[in-house]
Image (spheres, grey):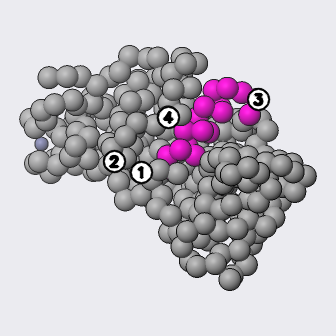
Amino acid sequence: MTIRQDEAIILRTRDYRESDRLITFFSRSQGQLTGIAKGARRSKKRFVHTLEPLSHVLITYADRSSSGLVRIDASELKNGFIELRNDVTRLGYASLSCEVVLEMSPERQANPTLFALLNHYLKELGGKGEPENSSFLFLVRMLSLSGYAPNLQKCLRCGRDSTSAQGWFFSISQGGLLCGNHRPGGKVYLLSLGTVMLLRQAQQLPLGKVWRLRFHRKSRDECRFLLLDLVRHHLEKDLKSLKLLYQIGALEVTNSSVNP
Ligand SMILES: [Zn+2]
């Protein structure tokens, strides 16, 4: 049995048996893990409310077999992101990011860069960051870190450079741009050159600087459903946390995709 202590962000909690809870967390050095917190339902004292979704904690756990559940022994709060919990829009976008990490990151696959991304993003959301703008930046980086970076350099068919035209189509199924001469069939997304360049910068800038990028109205309308649909396409399922964003009207803007 190995005892580890690691920074982690809590992604999901579920009640388990009479008095326990199952906690899924993303740790800095071991990636996504699920652990059992014995007695967490009966005694609030033991973990002092640290095992709540979104919380950034220092967690101590016992790993028996390098597979299956770990046993959570202790948890110390580093950042509870209180400011996210008091604002329903910020909470909606924060919950979306936790669900995306939960669904897209394989269990027990270390990804310290993804841990840093999620932690930076939650801080940004809890601070001055405009929620939707920050969520676009998070989703672009998340897709890249998961191996699904959209191809924004050139037309997938003819190789024409993306800086050479003002308007582009994006094909979700092909994962990249197509020029006006190679408009794809099925549902396509229109992207202006400005949006393409913003998305490219979002993929490339160092993590500490990426949050400065601003999506103005046109780029927002173009990206809103594109990024979510890319995630849903790779997961092959819908995201539960979108329901809250729809309920509060955060996603009630015209879809810029067009059908043939
Ligand atoms: Zn082309």
Task: Determine if the C-beta at disc 4 is less than 8 A from ligand 1.
Answer: no
Q: Of all residues shown, which one is farthest toward the front?
A: 18
- Residue 27 image-quadrant placement: bottom right
On the question of residue 160 being in view, the answer is yes
Marks 3/2: CA–CA distance: 31 Å
Query: In the image, residue 173 lies at what x, y percent?
Result: 22, 43
Q: Give the structural element (helix, strand or loop) at label 2.
A: helix
Residue hosting label 3: 86
Eye-nearest disc, 4 or 2? 4
C-alpha gap between disc 3 and disc 4: 20 Å
Residue underneath mark 2: 234
- Count of marks, rendered view: 4
Q: Which mark is residue 168?
A: none
Identify the magenta region.
Answer: 85-101
What amino acid type is highlighted by mark number 3?
Asn
Q: Kindly state the secondary structure of the residue where label 1 is placed.
A: helix
Q: In the image, which is nearer the foreground, mark 4 or mark 1?
A: 4
| Residue 119 seen from this side | no
Q: Nearer the N terminus, badge 3 or badge 2?
A: 3
Q: Which residue is mark 1?
A: 143
Which residue is under mark 4?
Answer: 240
Q: CA distance from mark 2 to mark 1?
A: 9 Å
Q: Is residue 250 magenta?
A: no
